[in-house]
Amino acid sequence: MLIDVITYQAENKLLAWLEDSHRSLSSILRFQFGLTTISPSESSLLRAASSVLSDYRATIFICKDGDVFIAWSGAKQSIVDRLQDAIYMYCDLPPSPPIHQYYDLNAHGETLRLVIREKLEKNPPIADKIATDSIVAVVRAADLLQPTPEQLTQFAAAMKQRPLRKQPSILIVEDQLFSRKLLTGMLESEFKVTAVSHAETGLGAYLSLAPDILFLDIELPDANGHDLAATIRRFDPTAFIVMVTANQYAEDVARARENGAKAYIGKPYSRQKIMEAIHKYTQSRPSAGGTR
Amino acid sequence: MTQPVDLSNLRSMIQDDVELERELFATFYESFEGGLNDLQQALQSADQENWRRHAHALKGIAYNLGANRLGDLCKTAQDHPQASEAEKTNLLQSLQIEYASAKQYLVSISGDIG
């Protein structure tokens, strides 16, 4: 499973997504949060989508006016119903839920394009990443990486599933789409994989899913991967964290070790290095016959 | 002269999944072109940290693809955020030329329009 969450230039990126000729069998579910006072968090949207779209590649587009579009390849009505229920549950919606529409891209592609273009005319999308970064920088990384009591309760429940899994659940936190797709593509045929692009979303996903293995990039847009690793280790001392990065600086390796990272993989990734890390995990699990 | 991209590691990772490979090529084009624009903006605004950060991001993409010459140029850019405007301009041009070479190669082997 690969789920992207897009907020920067979401409207333009959704239009580009629609233009891709491979999307003909795709579906989009739109929630008009923009007409309400509700602003669901990225992590709650991701949890909702993860609970339903485990066998799909999906993208969540969060528009400047608050509307959320969830897009995936596939056209089953049963998915739509389950996704609606998941959004209501995870986003803690009041009794009067936001208006939502389903678009089958094969039949409604042009209609959807008109909807997005109208949005672009009325609301210029979130400013480009460089300008927005200055706003994000005001929020200290430490504030972004504080689990809420509700999230910790959810994590405790998810941890009970860990020893019951037949194969490892893997979370990837990597901001570069190419590297994220490469790692996901390599692993998703054998393992249950969730991939996100930001530290805050990664923390939310970790608390929601209690994955067995975390592949964690160091340079992330909203926080440092080392800080995320340290945060996770505080509430999950057993976390199996593999740092991945394009750098091989000694200080990064040392800090990864201090944070209890089990492995450090530089780019380019290789199948051998990735599978060695996963093998190290399975050997360390008592249920796998290994020893801790 | 060696090809601009060595796909052996990538193909080993994805077990010769042709559809995924095609998707990764498309992502490479979009991500790298966006990244080159980001570098251009960082050059124009004399923003050393953004220059370093964007070069770092491109380096990871290039190496993971197998475009090692391109990755080496990105590494040079990343390691010299304090280079002069003229040096950065030359480096950016080299990146654009090497990227174009890599893209041309990928398009030729995949039959994509790109």
Image (cartoon, rainbow, N blue to C red):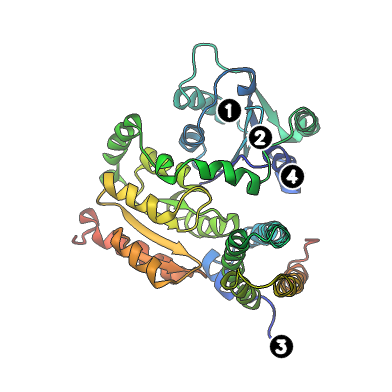
- Residue A231 relative to residue A105: left or right: left
Tell me where residue A136 appears, x and y as whole percent. Answer: 54, 42
- Residue A138 point in image, percent of width and height: 51, 42
- Which of these two is toward me, B68 or B54? B54
Quadrant where the image shows the N terminus of chain B: bottom right
Q: Give the spatial CA distance, label 3 vs label 2.
A: 46 Å
**Tags 1 and 3 on a common chain:** no
Marking on residue A16: 4
- The part of the image, by quadrant, that contains residue A143 is top left
Q: Which residue is mark 3?
A: B1
Labelled disc at residue A27: 2
From the viewer's side, name the closer residue of A237 and B36: B36
Give how far apart the Cα atoms at labels 4 and 2 are: 15 Å
The answer to whether residue B66 is left or right of residue A187 is right
Q: Chain of mark 4?
A: A
Q: Can residue A168 be spotted in the picture?
A: no
**What separation in Å lies between label 1 and label 3 (alpha carbons)?**
52 Å
On whether disc 4 and disc 2 are found on a single subunit, the reply is: yes
What's under tag 1, amino acid-wise? Val
| Farthest residue, direction top | A95
Give the chain of mark 2.
A
Camera sees residue A24: yes
Q: Are marks 1 and 2 in contact (CB under 8 Å)?
A: yes
* Kind of residue at disc 4: Ala
Q: Amino acid at mark 2?
A: Ser
User: In the structure shown, which secondary structural element does the residue marked by tag 3 occupy?
Assistant: loop
Residue drawn at the location 54% of the way across and 25% of the way down: A39
